[in-house]
Image (tube, grey):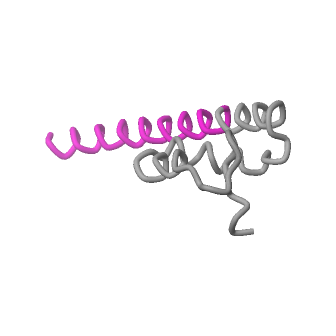
């Protein structure tokens, strides 16, 4: 009885987890597309950075905080990522 219960719940968990991963993937696709469209309209020179910035923002904590650190060479509103290039 316990074994059957665990097997049934494991199946439900697997299905839930697969749906969750699919929804996260769809969510990230939408956010990435939206960030690219915003970059196209506002900063065409930085379009290739939009997906990276979106991923860093969504991942949270340190990655998100690093987006708000202003570099001295960056212009107002610019990301300032050209220093290493």
Answer above or below: position of 34 versus 49. Answer: above
Name the residue rendered at 68%, 51% in the picture: 74
Whole-percent x, y for residue 53 in the image: 62, 46
Q: Could you say which is closer to the camera, residue 62 or residue 6?
A: 62
- The image shows a total of numbered marks equal to 0
Magenta part of the chain: 1-30
Name the dominant secondary structure of the magenta segment.
Answer: helix
Residue 32 falls left or right of residue 42: left
Instruction: Farthest residue to the left: give it.
Output: 2
Relative image position of residue 60 (x, y in whole percent):
44, 45
Residue placed most toward the observer, 41 or 76: 76
* 72 in relation to 16, above or below: below
User: Is residue 71 in the magenta section?
Assistant: no
Give the quadrant of residue 30: top right
Residue under the image location 21 percent in, 38 percent down: 5
Asked whether, in this view, residue 21 is left or right of residue 25, the answer is: left
- In the current view of this chain or complex, which residue is farthest to the bottom? 84
Quadrant of the frame with the C terminus = bottom right
Q: Position of residue 66 (x, y in %)?
A: 50, 52
Above or below: residue 71 compared with residue 21: below
Q: Position of residue 71 (x, y in %)?
A: 59, 55
Q: Quadrant of the N terminus?
A: top left
Answer above or below: position of 26 versus 62.
Answer: above
Side (left or right) of 80 relative to 42: left
Quick one: 1 or 28, which is closer to the camera?
A: 28
- Residue shown at the point (47%, 36%) measured from the top left: 20
Q: Inspect the magenta stretch and tell me whether residue 24 lies in it.
A: yes
């Amino acid at each position: 009885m316990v074994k059957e219960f665990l097997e049934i719940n494991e199946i439900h968990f697997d299905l839930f987890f697969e749906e969750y991963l699919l929804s996260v993937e769809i969510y990230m696709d939408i956010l990435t597309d939206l960030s690219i469209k915003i970059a196209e309209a506002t900063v065409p020179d930085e379009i290739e950075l939009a997906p990276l910035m979106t991923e860093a923002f969504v991942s949270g904590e340190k990655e998100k905080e690093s987006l708000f650190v202003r570099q001295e060479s960056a212009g107002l509103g610019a990301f300032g990522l050209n220093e290493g290039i």
